[in-house]
Amino acid sequence: MVQSGIPGLDEILGGDLRKKNVILLHGGPGSGKTTLATQFLYKGATENGEPGIYVSLCEDPAEIRKNMLFFGWDLAKLEKGKKLQMIDARPVTFNDEGYIVPDDKLFKGESIPFSHVSRRILEAAKKIGAKRLVIDSITVLTSQYDNPAYVRQGLLGLIQVLSSLDCTTLLLSESTKGPYDEPTLEWILVPGVIVLYYTRKGSSMIRAIQVRKMRGFKHSPDFFHVEIGNRGIVVHPEERAEL
């Protein structure tokens, strides 16, 4: 079993996470997805001796390193110690003339979507003996293609690859419709879904978390309060939230 490193989360999950499990972490802007995912990797590396990989498809890894120093998490130090590898997998870049262009290293000539990303993950996992993995975010990958059948094929293949690794994986996905998004294809294909909420109630904004599904666990389906402080994310299992 794998301890999440998020105080209170394992309690509402009904137990620790499982090795080789692929969990979708879904939420809107500001809900804490990147913070929770980084905390999962950082605590795994520093407290459990479990190397991790962060695949960034949205943000410059340098920005993630800088932002996480707010919580006291020195990701660069972990990278130097071979306890963490940051992979910049953003699908676009810019050339010397300043034009925005696709990153051909990731998407050129793929017969099935996400093949190049999965290859880079496999190489990195073998290199550092990774036990934890974060992909931020799967929405960037799926939005590259118009054909739903093609996307489904790619997702099935990617999840199969991730499940073959000796890793626990968090797949981040972005909320686009509000706090009560309908389940998407990713929700159906993965064994576990955790949703983070950052929504307005009256004149205030509240944070909450819900385990929508977790195969093999007797988890609570309730909403619980979440706090983001200077030490990271804390889940409060004793405090139900009303959204």
Image (cartoon, rainbow, N blue to C red):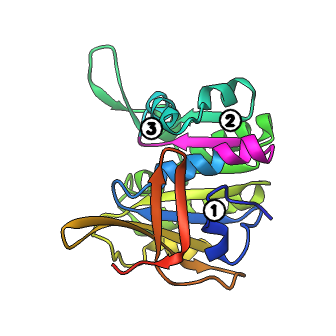
Determine whether label 3 and label 1 are within 8 Å by CB. Answer: no
Q: Residue furthest front?
A: 238
**Which mark, by number, is residue 84?**
2
Local SS, label 1:
helix
Residue indicated by mark 1: 159
Q: Residue at x 68, y 85 (%)?
A: 218
Q: CA distance from mark 3 to mark 2?
A: 18 Å
What amino acid type is highlighted by mark number 2?
A: Leu
Q: CA distance from mark 1 to mark 2?
A: 21 Å
- Point out residue 104 in the picture as x, y percentages from the top left corner: 46, 33
- Point out residue 228 in the picture as x, y percentages from the top left corner: 45, 54
Q: Is residue 107 left or right of residue 12?
A: left
Q: Residue at x 57, y 46 (%)?
A: 38
- Which comes sooner in the sequence, label 1 or label 2? 2
Res 31 seen here: yes
- Which comes sooner in the sequence, label 3 or label 1? 3
Which range is magenta?
A: 42-58
- Whether the magenta-drawn stretch holds residue 44 is answered as yes
- Which comes sooner in the sequence, label 3 or label 2? 2
Residue indicated by mark 3: 90
- Point out residue 128 in the picture as x, y percentages from the top left corner: 78, 35
